[in-house]
Amino acid sequence: MSGTSPLFQPTTLGSLSLPNRLVMAPMTRNRAAADGTPTDLMAEYYAQRSAAGLIIAEATTPNAVGQTYPNIPALHLPRHVAGWRRVTEAVAEAGGRMFVQLQHGGRIGHPANSGLRPVAPSPVTFPEPVATPDGNRPAVVPRTMSLDEIESTVADFAAAARRAVDAGFAGVEVHGANGYLIHQFLADGTNHRTDAYGGSTARRMRFAVEVVRAVAAAVGPERVGLRLSPGFPGQGMSESDTDVLYPALVEELSGLGLAYLHLVWAKPDQPLYRRLRAAWPGALIANPAQPWPGPLPADGGRREAERLLDAGADLVSLGRAFLANPDLPERLAAGAPLNPVRIEHWYGGDHTGYTDYPTLRQPALA
Ligand SMILES: Cc1cc2nc3c(=O)[nH]c(=O)nc-3n(C[C@H](O)[C@H](O)[C@H](O)COP(=O)(O)O)c2cc1C
């Protein structure tokens, strides 16, 4: 069944050789220690999923104030590097390859999580409650970032990227999607600045471009990916100029030689998606738009993944199907049934709903 599908054909990404075109999408699981240090349980979880062509490890904060939720991994202290090294070594030993996603939460955060007031391009409060160790709490008004803070935050992304490479990651994905800090700068719903970082499309793009350029200069562009979610309406986001903003941003970054562009909610028939594919000269990872929060299609998203490859994507990322199926490539190739996703264990907890999903070879693991 797998014989003819391009999903299971080897490919390359920069200097990496990938055994297939299935990428494990970044997924926050809130299993790091309270200080952001990755744990041995995380090493086990990622090693179990090392059959992915590429793993993109979950959103990881490049500095203290960027922390979103409780038990989010970090990359700003030596102990974070040491913890992540155990994860990358476990994945390499199991035959896998791994990037890590760098995410600054911006207005999505809480003093109860980071000890600090969240910062953002403008004082536009996140309209939803934020998870904290004491349960969901109302979001606080974020503090407006000064120009100095913007500069130091760009430097924090670059330093975190260096630490990621020290920790054994093959590269980093800059999180420009889903309503976090970089997206808050891009979108005019959350960016009301009147200085060099707000107003026109070009000025709202500036922070994203500076972060990507700084990270690429720090570790080499071939080790850097960027995740974007054009028009994403969740997390209180709104953009009045999606069709102008994203083509302009992609065009601006197209000459840097980045490892990849990663598009969320990718729809092969959508004109903007096709336009971005055409404008991006490098590898494109497409994350299909599947029912949210579920259930997933019975084929685990294989048909949709193949449609995206047909429409010009180089790789396809899947999230929930990898979360619940450590051996996802083998299952998709065989047309085997998938484990159902246990949503109640997504965010936080122990091994339950995390490392206890059975594989075809070890059906009794749970
Ligand atoms: C539990 C969970 C955590 C997630 N955390 C992140 C994250 O840290 N960073 C990110 O960019 N997307 C995150 N996402 C979104 C996924 O990367 C992916 O885009 C989404 O699940 C849709 O893909 P799917 O239909 O294959 O699951 C998360 C999704 C889930 C289910």
Image (cartoon, grey):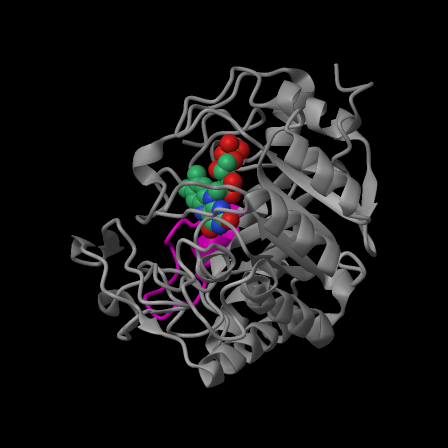
- In this picture, is 323 found above or below 141? above
- Look at the image and tell me whether residue 52 can be seen: no
Q: Position of residue 320 (x, y in %)?
A: 48, 34
Tell me the residue at 48%/46% (across/down). Answer: 240
| Pick the front one: 357 or 272 | 272
Q: Judge whether residue 322 is colored magenta.
A: no
Q: Is residue 29 magenta?
A: yes
Residue at the spot 45% in from the left edge and 64% down from the top edge: 104
Q: Quadrant of the C terminus?
A: top left
Residue 233 appears in the figure: yes
Residue at the farthest bottom position: 148
Residue at the image point whose x is 78% and y is 63% from the top: 256
Specify start and end residues of the magenta stretch as a single range. Answer: 25-45
Residue 247 drawn at (x, y percent): 68, 48
Whole-percent x and y of residue 28? 43, 50
Q: Position of residue 349 (x, y in %)?
A: 30, 48
**Residue 101, quarter of the rendered image:** bottom right
Question: How many numbered marks have been drawn onto this rendered protein structure?
Answer: 0
In the picture provided, is 289 more to the left or to the right than 96? left
Q: Residue at x 77, y 25 (%)?
A: 310
Q: Compared to 247, does 150 lie above or below?
A: below
Main SS, magenta residues: loop
Q: Is residue 163 left or right of residue 276?
A: left
Residue 121: image quadrant is bottom left
